[in-house]
Amino acid sequence: MLKFLLLKFFTFFIGCLSCFIMHTALGLPVVIAAALTGLVGSFIPFPNSYTTHPYAAIYAGSFAGMCSSSLISSYWEIAIISTIGAAIYVLTRNAFLGFGGRLGSVAFASVALFSLAKGLTL
């Protein structure tokens, strides 16, 4: 279970960070940045033993990385969002089977929970 969670965290973090950097540092539109993240992420070679589909977590992370730079002020905050997102992804892996929108829902929930927690601490 820990290996599964770490894989999801790593891939979610890669997707979130790359999308965020593309739209903040490179000035790409957020939709293009998310699409490029998903496209490039689909070519990352994972061993066949990873049957947990790490590509979906990359794409979910790219959705979370679409958030505004006014919300995220450091890369540590991207790591926190990725931790929340990976945990939600793992906890809901058997839920919402056959329904669309799971990846976007995971991304939304992770950013919303982070935003709520950040607002409560200010």
Image (spheres, rainbow, N blue to C red):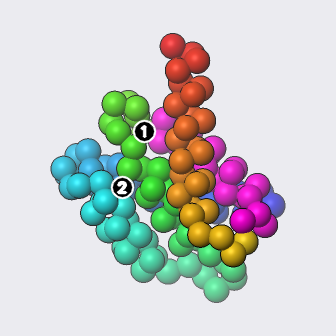
Q: Position of residue 94 (x, y in %)?
A: 78, 66
Whichever of labels 2 and 1 marks the residue nearer the N terminus, that label is 2
Label 2: how many Cα within 10 Å (few below 14, some 14–19, many 20+):
many
Q: Which mark is residue 117?
A: none
Regarding residue 85, the answer to whether it shows in the image is yes
Residue at image point 67% right, 57% down: 89
Q: Magenta span has 121?
A: no
Q: Quadrant of the N terminus?
A: bottom right
Most frequent secondary structure within the magenta stretch: helix
> Residue drawn 54% across and 52% down?
107
Q: CA distance from mark 2 to mark 1?
A: 12 Å
Q: Which residue is mark 1?
A: 75
The part of the image, by quadrant, that contains residue 80 is: top right
- SS for tag 2? helix
Amino acid type, mark 1: Tyr
Magenta residues span 77-96
Residue farthest toward the left in the current orientation of the protein: 27
Q: Which residue is mark 2?
A: 19
**Within the magenta stretch, is there residue 94?**
yes
Horizontal side, residue 1 vs residue 27: left or right: right
Q: How far across and how far down the image is residue 79, in percent?
A: 53, 42
Above or below: residue 46 compared with residue 69: below
Q: Mark 2 or mark 1: which is in front?
A: 2
Q: Quadrant of residue 68?
A: top left
> Regarding mark 1 in the picture, which secondary structure is present there?
helix
- Could you tell me residue 58's position as x and y percent? 50, 64
- Left or right: residue 96 versus residue 113 is right
Taking the image as drawn, is residue 6 in sight? no
Q: Amino acid at mark 2?
A: Cys
